[in-house]
């Protein structure tokens, strides 16, 4: 199924992006113009055409998006790998009610592309573990995801 192109999320991807998820975010480095790649997990699909995510307010990601609104989210789901590209904007410099200083970013989807190489499928999704206080991590995750849902 490689090289399928859509202009919005389809159901399996929408569902995946409405629960805790590991994704790769690529932005344009504001200093060099080169790709800048980061792993993030505070991401939520509001609908088929809009994804919101939270990042540290003082991160380079925010600076990159303020200078170039182009971004790509790479998602491993539905037995494949997807490139979700679009235009971003900083919706809130600081999300209120969260202990960390986080910014809210919105991505308006322009293209969803299946980028898995021909004749293959993903047989196991990436998994990660929290390496600090699990109770504190769970509490923070709930706060951030709720803020994203309400965005």
Image: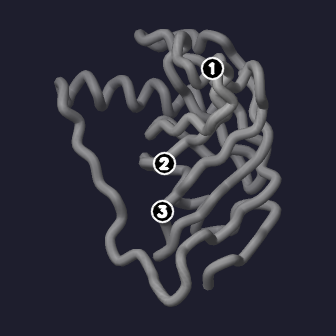
Q: Residue at x 53, y 10 (%)?
A: 58
Residue behind mark 1: 62
The CA distance from mark 2 to mark 1 is 17 Å
Residue 151 makes an appearance in the image? no
Q: In x, y percent, where is residue 87? A: 79, 39
Q: Are the two marked residues, 2 and 1, in contact with CB atoms closer than 8 angstroms?
A: no
Which image quadrant is residue 3 in?
bottom right
Please state, as top left, top right, bottom left or bottom right, where the N terminus lies in the image.
bottom right
Q: Is residue 19 above or below residue 69?
A: below
Which residue position holds label 2? 23
Q: State the quadrant of the C terminus.
A: top right
Q: Quadrant of residue 118?
A: bottom right
Return the mark for residue 98: none
Q: Residue furthest bottom?
A: 119
Crowdedness near tag 3: few (<14), some (14–19) or many (≥20) residues, C-alpha within 10 Å: many
Name the residue: 63% across, 20% down: 62
Give left or right: position of 58 versus 72. Answer: left
Mark closer to the chain start, 2 or 3? 2
Residue 81 at x, y = what percent? 53, 67
Disc 2 packing (10 Å; few <14; some 14–19; many ≥20) = some
Could you tell whether 11 is left or right of 132 in the image? right
Specify how the rendered protein is coloured: one colour
Q: Which residue is mark 3?
A: 76
């Amino acid at each position: 199924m490689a090289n399928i192109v859509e202009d919005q999320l389809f159901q399996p991807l929408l569902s995946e992006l409405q629960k805790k998820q590991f994704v790769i975010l690529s932005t344009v480095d504001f200093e060099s113009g080169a790709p800048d790649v980061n792993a993030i997990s505070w991401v939520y699909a509001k609908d088929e055409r809009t994804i919101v995510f939270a990042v540290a307010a003082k991160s380079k990601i925010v600076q990159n998006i303020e200078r170039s609104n182009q971004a790509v989210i790479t998602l491993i789901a539905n037995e494949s790998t997807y490139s979700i590209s679009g235009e971003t904007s900083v919706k809130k410099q600081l999300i209120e009610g969260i202990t960390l200083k986080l910014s809210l970013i919105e991505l308006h989807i322009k293209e969803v592309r299946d980028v898995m190489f021909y004749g293959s499928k993903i047989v196991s999704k990436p998994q990660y573990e929290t390496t600090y206080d699990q109770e504190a991590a769970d509490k923070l995750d709930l706060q951030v995801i709720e803020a994203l849902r309400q965005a």
